[in-house]
Image (cartoon, rainbow, N blue to C red):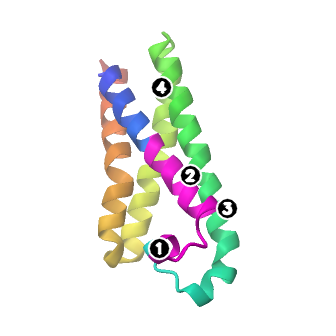
Amino acid sequence: MVILASVFAVLAALLHVLFFAYESLLFERPEVHARFRTRTEDVPAVKPWAYNQGFYNLFLAVGALVGVVLALAGQEAVGLALVLLACGSMLAAAVVLVTTDRAMARAAATQGTFPLLAVVFSVVALLA
């Protein structure tokens, strides 16, 4: 179960690194800010928020990756606790996204599926 939790945590982390790149590095590009339903004329007002949000995503990704490294290095309980914190936060953000705007269900599913699986397998591994 630790291996499955680790695989899904790494996938969730990689996806959140991609979100970081979109939000903090590439947000001004029309094809990027359009993904976030932001009109070009609104980019200057939204860009600081997106930049900040991107770093939240990066920090969650780092937490998940550190958790995976620790779990696979023999510190299973500590590592899986970090995976649960990071991926649980990612999952919670996906739930908030879909409950805020049902039109964002696809984005929430994309954002939340890997973290959900990482959380499930982490809990199963910890309870075993």
- Reply above or below: 16 against 2: below
Q: Residue at point 59% right, 68% down?
A: 27
Q: Tell me whether circle 2 and circle 3 mark residues in contact (CB < 8 Å).
A: no
- Reply above or below: 73 against 10: above
Dot 2 corresponds to which residue? 57
Q: Earlier in the sequence, mark 2 or mark 3?
A: 3
Q: Which mark is residue 52?
A: 3
Q: Tell me whether circle 2 and circle 4 mark residues in contact (CB < 8 Å).
A: no
Q: Residue at point 42% right, 67% down?
A: 97
Determine the image quadrant of residue 105. Answer: bottom left
Question: Where is the N terminus found, in terms of image quarters?
Answer: top left
Amino acid at dot 4? Val
Q: Which of the two marks, 1 or 3, is nearer to us in this view?
A: 1
Q: Earlier in the sequence, mark 1 or mark 3?
A: 1
Dot 4 corresponds to which residue? 68
Neighbor class of circle 1 (other Cα within 10 Å; few <14, some 14-19, many 20+) is few
User: From mark 2 to mark 4, how far is it between C-alphas?
Assistant: 17 Å
